Image (cartoon, grey):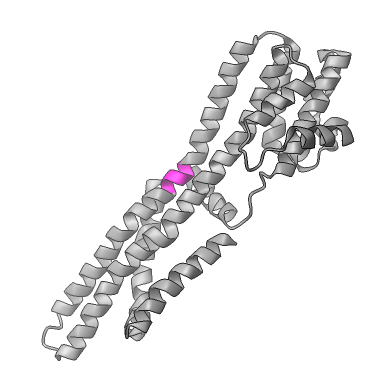
């Protein structure tokens, strides 16, 4: 929603001021379709040539998330920490072997079922169960598991950032493609040098629209989307950091209530529940 609002502000300020100062918007609108095809087509072709199919798919998926609100809210984090509390509490009371079935069959586990979207999130469930399985097996110590967690989180971060980098390259290339469109317009104008000055002036103005459009698309549309997607990638990584910190605290001997407090502390301040909010929520669940 805020993406659309931001774009509307850009369009109103840029074109509104242009019209207010007596600019001929007709020249811009006449040239716009042709310049858009040139710049947009060249950009998309370069994007396809520059990226593997998995990066293209990730970029398109990431663009879709830019127009949605963030799912990483205080309510989601409380649900996640309550899920971790429940499973760690069961392991503490009944032994690690008691959670083996929950780990091996999370989709049929009552613990995962009663924690809403978090308990059904494939990536979250897989991350939790993979490391709980290692804890149950007892073959790795806390330092080894922490190193493995860091490697997996870093890999996830790199995969998600590939889409961000692809969009940033698009933003960097758009002004250049705008110049390409403008140069073609100038070439076309020079080929019509015998036309009256009024005609030549209109053709030069149309050519300059290409440069204007490339810069506008780069810094008002593509670059903000890349920045927003990067923020969303960082948010997704924070959830894994929360799980990692909670499980490691449990492995180091802290009780479940203290372990989830460790996890709560790594969350962003804007989304972090207070100690009292989390305690009340866990007791309610």
Image-quadrant location for residue 246? top right
Q: Residue furthest left?
A: 194
Residue found at x 75% / y 21%? 258
Q: Is residue 109 something that shows in the picture?
A: no
Residue 178 versus residue 118 in the image, above or below: below
Image-quadrant location for residue 123? top right
Image-quadrant location for residue 248? top right
In the picture, which quadrant includes the N terminus?
A: bottom right
Residue found at x 48% / y 66%? 7
Q: Position of residue 269 (x, y in %)?
A: 62, 39
Q: Position of residue 224 (x, y in %)?
A: 45, 55
Q: Is residue 8 magenta?
A: no
Q: Position of residue 119 (x, y in %)?
A: 77, 37
| Range shown magenta | 162-166
Instruction: Report the label total.
Output: 0
In the picture, which quadrant includes the C terminus?
A: top right
Residue 44 versus residue 146 in the image, above or below: below
Residue found at x 11% / y 87%? 194
Principal secondary structure, stretch drawn in magenta: helix
Q: Is residue 5 something that shows in the picture?
A: yes
Judged left or right of residue 51, residue 280 is: right
Q: Position of residue 281 (x, y in %)?
A: 83, 37
The foreground one among 98 and 272 is 272
Residue 141 versus residue 3 in the image, above or below: above
Residue found at x 58% / y 35%? 237
């Amino acid at each position: 929603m805020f993406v659309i609002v931001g774009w509307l502000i850009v369009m109103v300020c840029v074109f509104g001021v242009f019209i207010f100062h007596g600019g001929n918007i007709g020249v811009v609108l006449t040239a716009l379709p042709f310049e858009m095809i040139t710049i947009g087509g060249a950009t998309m072709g370069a994007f396809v040539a520059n990226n593997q199919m998995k990066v293209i798919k990730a970029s398109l998926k990431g663009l879709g998330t830019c127009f949605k609100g963030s799912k990483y809210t205080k309510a989601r984090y409380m649900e996640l920490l309550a899920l971790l509390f429940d499973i760690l509490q069961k392991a503490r009371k009944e032994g690690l072997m008691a959670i083996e079935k929950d780990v091996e069959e999370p989709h049929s586990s009552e613990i995962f079922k009663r924690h809403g979207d978090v308990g059904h999130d494939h990536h979250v469930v897989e991350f939790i169960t993979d490391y709980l399985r290692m804890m149950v097996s007892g073959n790795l110590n806390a330092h080894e598991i922490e190193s493995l967690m860091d490697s997996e989180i870093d890999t996830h971060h790199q995969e998600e950032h590939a889409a961000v980098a692809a969009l940033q390259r698009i933003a960097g290339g758009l002004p250049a493609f705008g110049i390409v469109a403008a140069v073609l317009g100038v070439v076309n104008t020079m080929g019509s040098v015998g036309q009256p000055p009024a005609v030549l002036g209109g053709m030069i103005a149309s050519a300059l629209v290409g440069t204007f459009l490339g810069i506008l698309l780069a810094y008002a549309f593509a670059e903000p989307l890349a920045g927003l997607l990067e923020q969303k990638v960082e948010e997704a990584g924070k959830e894994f950091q929360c799980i990692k910190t909670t499980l490691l605290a449990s492995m180091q001997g802290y009780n479940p209530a203290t372990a989830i407090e460790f996890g709560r502390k790594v969350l962003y301040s804007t989304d972090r529940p207070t100690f009292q909010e989390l305690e009340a929520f866990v007791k309610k669940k």
